[in-house]
Image: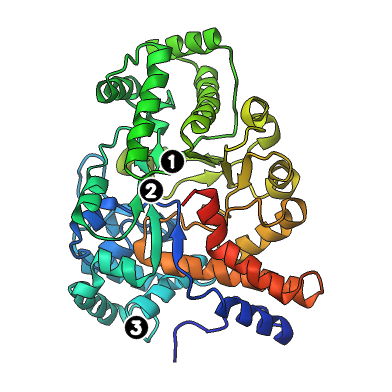
C-alpha cells in the first residue's frame, strides 16, 4: 500500500476531484523551477554523497527540529551545532531515532506530507516511519545514499529541476558556483544576491562587513557614493555568475526615498556606529529603494521577505545561532511602508518587485490590491509557515479576485531540505489544481482555461517573473 494517496489534496466532491485530477495530469511531469531557496551550492560542486539520513532530513531542517523543540526535545539532542562549539549529539542514528520516535508530532502538517513523499518517492520506502521502523528506514536510506544515483547531481536530474537558485551573502566569493560552472555539468544552479549583512546596521559586525565589502570591490565604503558603487560591483559579480534576483529579509516593509544629501548624512551616522533603532530602520528602508533603482539599471528582480521577527528566542540565538526555528510572523504595513519606493520607481517599465509576507491578513487588504495596481509589483507565493495546501488555498481565495493569477509568480520552495523540493512542488501543484477545479465546477472558468493557468502556475509565471 502506498504511503501517499494518489488523490491527496484534491477536493472530496467527485466532480471537482475528477477535474483536479485531469488538471494535475497535465502538469505533473513538468520540470521544477526553483527560483528561491537555500540549498548549499557546495553539494553540486563537490557532488559527494550526503553523509547520512540525519544530516539529510533532520539537522539542517528548521521545520523539523522546530516541532521537536516545541515538544521538549533540545536542539543539542538533534545535532544542531552550538555557537561555542559545545557538545551536541554526534551519533546520526541516535538523532534519527529521536526523530522517528516523535514523528507522530507532524500529523496533519505539511512537513508530514513532504517527508512521507520523500521517503516513498525518493527512497522507495513502503511503511510509515515510527520508533519501530526507525532502524530499518535509516539503513535503507543510508544504503541508497552510497549509490551513484543518489549523489546531489543525480538527484537534481532525477527530480527534473530546470533551475535552482541559492541564496548567497553579498560577501560570498561564489566559489562553489564557479566550480559548478567549470565542471561541465549541465545542471543550472544560480546564486541570489542577499545583502542583509551589509545593509542592516543591527547585524553583528556590520562595520567590519562594510570594510570587507570595500576590500572586495575596491570602493571606498566609508562614504555614501562608494558604498553604493560597491553594491553595484557585487551585483555585477553575482550577475556574471548567473544571478537573476536579489533578496532582502527585512523586519518590515518600511521604505524611504531621501534626497542624496540626507541619505549620505544618514549613512555617515550609521558608519560612525552607535545608531539608534529608528536610524537603522530608516537606513534599511532607504536601501530597499536604492536596490530597486539598481534593479532598473541591471535587471535583477528584487524580492522582499518582510514580516518575520527572526531569532525570537534570545537563549537559543545565544547558544545555537541564527535560523534555528525561532522566527515568528509579525504584522507588516505594506501600503504605507512601500509608498516611498513605489512613488519613486513603481511605474517604471522593466522593474519587478516580488513581495512575500508572513502576515496572511494583509493578502486581501493590502498586497493583492497593491499588486493589482502597481506594474512593478508581483506577489510571491505563501511563504514559510503557509507553504501548505491550506495556505495556498487561502492565498488564492484572498488574492485572485483582486490581482488575478498573472500578478503572482507561481511557486518557489524556499528550502534547504533538498529532498523535499519535489514534494513541495507537488503540494503546490495539487493545491492549485484543487482551487482551479472549484472555479471550473462552479462555472467561473472553462476547463481549457484552467489547464492553461495550471501550466503557468507550475512553471510559466516563475520563469517570466525571475527572468529565467
Which residue, as the protein is rendered here, is positioned at the far bottom?
1
Label 1 neighbourhood size at 10 Å, few (<14), some (14-19), many (20+)?
A: some
- N-term mark: 3 or 1: 3
Which color scheme did the rendering employ for the protein? rainbow
Of labels 3 and 2, the one closer to you: 3
Answer whether labels 2 and 1 touch (C-beta < 8 Å). Answer: yes
Q: Name the residue under label 3.
A: 125
In the rendered image, residue 226, in percent from the top left (x then y), is placed at 37, 15
Tell me if residue 341 can be seen: no
Q: Residues within 10 Å of mark 3 (few under 14, many from 20)?
A: some
Q: Can residue 398 be seen in this view?
A: yes
Above-or-below relation of 407 to 216: below
User: Distance from label 3 to label 1 (Cα)?
Assistant: 35 Å
Q: Which residue in the rendered view is the most extreme toward the right? A: 443
Q: Quadrant of the N terminus?
A: bottom left
Quarter holding residue 9: bottom right
Residue drawn at (58%, 72%) of the image:
430
Residue 443 rendering spot, x and y as whole percentages: 82, 74
Q: What residue did someone put label 1 on? A: 311
Q: Name the residue rendered at 25%, 37% in the picture.
A: 173
Whether the residues at callouts 3 and 1 have beta carbons within 8 Å, the answer is no
Amino acid at each position: 500500500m502506498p504511503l501517499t494517496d494518489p488523490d491527496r489534496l484534491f477536493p472530496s466532491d467527485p466532480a471537482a476531484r475528477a477535474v483536479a485530477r485531469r488538471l494535475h495530469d497535465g502538469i505533473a511531469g513538468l520540470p521544477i523551477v526553483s527560483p528561491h531557496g537555500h540549498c548549499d551550492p557546495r553539494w553540486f560542486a563537490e557532488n559527494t554523497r550526503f553523509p547520512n539520513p540525519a544530516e539529510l532530513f533532520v539537522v539542517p531542517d528548521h521545520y523539523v527540529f522546530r516541532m521537536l523543540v516545541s515538544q521538549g526535545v533540545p536542539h543539542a539532542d538533534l545535532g544542531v551545532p552550538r555557537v561555542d562549539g559545545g557538545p551536541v549529539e554526534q551519533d546520526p542514528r541516535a538523532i534519527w531515532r529521536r526523530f522517528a520516535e516523535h514523528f507522530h508530532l507532524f500529523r496533519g502538517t505539511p512537513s508530514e506530507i513532504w517527508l512521507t513523499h520523500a521517503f516513498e518517492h525518493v527512497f522507495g520506502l513502503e511503511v510509515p516511519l515510527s520508533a519501530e521502523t526507525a532502524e530499518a528506514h535509516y539503513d535503507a536510506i543510508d544504503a541508497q545514499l552510497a549509490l551513484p544515483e543518489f549523489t546531489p547531481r543525480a538527484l537534481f536530474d532525477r527530480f527534473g529541476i530546470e533551475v535552482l537558485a541559492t541564496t548567497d551573502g553579498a560577501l560570498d566569493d561564489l566559489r562553489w558556483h564557479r566550480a559548478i560552472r567549470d565542471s561541465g555539468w549541465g545542471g543550472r544552479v544560480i546564486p541570489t544576491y542577499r545583502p542583509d549583512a551589509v545593509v542592516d546596521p543591527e547585524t553583528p559586525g556590520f562595520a567590519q562587513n562594510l570594510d570587507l565589502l570595500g576590500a572586495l570591490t575596491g570602493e571606498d565604503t566609508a562614504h555614501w557614493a562608494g558604498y553604493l558603487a560597491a553594491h553595484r560591483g557585487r551585483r555585477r559579480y553575482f550577475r556574471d555568475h548567473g544571478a537573476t534576483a536579489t533578496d532582502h529579509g527585512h523586519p518590515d516593509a518600511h521604505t524611504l526615498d531621501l534626497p542624496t544629501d540626507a541619505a549620505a548624512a544618514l549613512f555617515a551616522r550609521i558608519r560612525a556606529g552607535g545608531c539608534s533603532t529608528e536610524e537603522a530602520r530608516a537606513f534599511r528602508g532607504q536601501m530597499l529603494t536604492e536596490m530597486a533603482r539598481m534593479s532598473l539599471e541591471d535587471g535583477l528582480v528584487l524580492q522582499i521577505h518582510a514580516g518575520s521577527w527572526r531569532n525570537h528566542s534570545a537563549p537559543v540565538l545565544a547558544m545555537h545561532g541564527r535560523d534555528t526555528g525561532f522566527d515568528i510572523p509579525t504584522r507588516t504595513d505594506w501600503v504605507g511602508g512601500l509608498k516611498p519606493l513605489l512613488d519613486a520607481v513603481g511605474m517604471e517599465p522593466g522593474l519587478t518587485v516580488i513581495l512575500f509576507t508572513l502576515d496572511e491578513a494583509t493578502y486581501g487588504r493590502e498586497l493583492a490590491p497593491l499588486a493589482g495596481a502597481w506594474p512593478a509589483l508581483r506577489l510571491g507565493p505563501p511563504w514559510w509557515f503557509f507553504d501548505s495546501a491550506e495556505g495556498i488555498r487561502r492565498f488564492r481565495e484572498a488574492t485572485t479576485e483582486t490581482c488575478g493569477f498573472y500578478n503572482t509568480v507561481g511557486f518557489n520552495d524556499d528550502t534547504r531540505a533538498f529532498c523535499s523540493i519535489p514534494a513541495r512542488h507537488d503540494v503546490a501543484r495539487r493545491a492549485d489544481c484543487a482551487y482551479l477545479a472549484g472555479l471550473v465546477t462552479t462555472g467561473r472558468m472553462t476547463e481549457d482555461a484552467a489547464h492553461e493557468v495550471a501550466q503557468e502556475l507550475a512553471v510559466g509565471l516563475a520563469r517570466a517573473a525571475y527572468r529565467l
